[in-house]
Amino acid sequence: MFIINSPIEEIIEINPQIFLLKVFSPEIARIIKPGQFLNLRVTERTQPLLRRPFSVCDVNGDHIFLLFNIMGEGTSMLAHKPIGSDLDIIGPLGKGFNLEGEFDTAIIVAGGLGAAPFPYLTKQIKGKKNLYSFIGGRTKNDIITYNLENVREASDDGSRGIKGNVVKLLEDNLEKFNLEKIKIFACGPTAMLRSLKDLCVNFNIDCEVSTECAMACGFGICQGCPIESTEEQDHYLLVCKDGPVFNIKDVVI
Amino acid sequence: MSKVDLSVKIGSLVMRNPIMLASGTVGYGNEISEFTDLNKLGGIVTKSLSLKPRKGNPPQRIVETPSGMLNAIGLANIGVEVFLKEKIPFLKKFDVPLICNIAASTFEEYVECTRILTEEETIKAFEINVSCPNVREGGLSFGNNLNFVGKITELVRAATNKPLIIKLSPNVSYISEFAKVVKENGADAVSAINTLVGAMFNIYTRKPKIHNITGGLSGPAIKPIAIAKVLEISREIGIPIIGIGGIMDWKDVIEFMIAGSTAVQIGTLNFIDPSASGKIISQIEDHCVKNGIEKISSLTASYQL
């Protein structure tokens, strides 16, 4: 875990709302794992005050890549940072995906910007396991397939891929897989994760999910990001420190 | 050897400088110790402890506001017993005054927590939270009532000989009345201020942005209010004040001291820059050197009105 200033080398526009930030940060690139995140300070001023958390999207040599869309003031400032300016980063934070195990097929399930952590996961798992990506979004503009493999798409309005939701798309394709040999890696809106959890419980499929919650610090001191555990009823887990990646069976979504 | 005497005194508690880390913004010290050298600080104040563990409020607990944030954590904590067993061994390794913050729901619970914790020599002082705005029982209902605050102070005073600090609520008309009551009942100092009650709505769903509906406002947005409260206590009541509220840099520390603070606590800033306190300590020293201030304690209540 570092607090570090790293220069922005490129801001790549994926579409008018979605950007990929390329940052030179060998210290972080060396140790960060898929599913871990960084907490970025977008300004030294007091508005916006808090850092913004982002999953690592990809790593290439000494460079890290972060995918984000413009949600408000903070992300807008980030998209307009001058090339060469320093980015104030705390990271790597949290627990990432566990890529080890008996499974022979990895299945990525993502909705919208939930695709952000998976280019790096794809890079690390490619060649070691079979890999499929089920990607959903409200419209064609929300479907992000950047650096993903074997992609199947679903959109709510049918403007790209099949019309419908991505979990249904996965369910319709499940018969192709040996369910005891697959592991799902997921990230996306709560409604998507809830139906994915039902599917995984019904078919007893191993699944890790990257969760999201408003947070201030990102490393456990503010206690701002609780998530209910299915195991222990007397205390919350923290998304930032105990997650953001959890086994889907271990948390209440 | 430091050219400037940065040391300050709260009751019998001597601190090497006035920079403390505020309760609820440092957990129990372990995470923040990766970013800042605890041994350089004046003191650290633990997350509020209660007798039994508390689960805290459901999400959403935090929302950003203009130059600030609202939080309603609900005093989530591990409880006194687990704290002593699991956190004290780590904290023992540091040469920094450890101040335990206690938050309870009943008079008896305040006393019981203090009685148990005062036996632990690593704990050098107590800060009593009578003013958390985010719990249903106790908390603010105590902090708004002069008789309750007086009684808690009296009872806790009887349970420990260690320095006793009462953390006051700003959600009252005259904070100095509360400072007076705690002084009369034997407290050594007050911390001012705790967070201000605030709320925010989502205009589309018409629902509150945090689950608890209201939360405590902190950050630079509240600094002028905190300065005014510190000044009020300083002018009305002779009791050491630990100033808290939106400190973002060394200049804010100096301002809080001029307004009447003996020491200060850094809170929300720890979430944004967990290494800030170390930088602030060297910057206040520079300020003293440049301005011929030999003892930083001479700044306390040095306002020219």
Image (spheres, grey):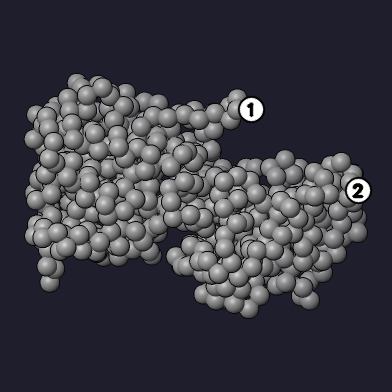
In percent of width and height, residue B234 lies at 14, 35
Circle 2 crowding by C-alpha within 10 Å: few under 14, some 14–19, many from 20:
some
Determine which residue is flagged by label 2.
A162
Residue B49 screen position, x and y as percent:
32, 42
| Quadrant placement of the N terminus of chain B | bottom left
Residue B146 in sight: yes
Q: Give the residue at x 40% y 34%.
A: B216
Left or right side of B36 for A175: right
Which three-letter amino acid code belongs to the residue tagged 2? Answer: Ile
Residue B95 point in image, percent of width and height:
21, 63
Mark 1 — on which chain does it sit?
B
Residue A251 in view, yes or no? no
Q: Numbered disc 2: what chain?
A: A
- In front here: A129 or A150? A150
Q: Observer-nearest residue: B222 or A226? A: B222
| Horizontal arrangement in the rendering, residue B153 relative to residue A101 (left or right) | left
The residue wearing badge 1 is B205
Quarter occupied by the C terminus of chain B: top left
> Badge 1: how crowded within 10 Å, few (<14), some, or many (20+)?
few
Rendered view: B203 above or below B11? above
Q: Residue at x 69, y 63 (%)?
A: A12
Position of residue B85 in the picture relative to residue B181 (left or right): right
Measured as percent of width and height from the top left, residue A75 is found at 59, 51
Query: Relative to the observer, which residue lies in front, A49 or A27?
Result: A49
Distance, label 1 to label 2, CA atoms, is 30 Å
Asked if A93 appears above or below A29 in the picture, the reply is above
At numbered mark 1, what does the secondary structure look like: helix, strand or loop?
Answer: loop
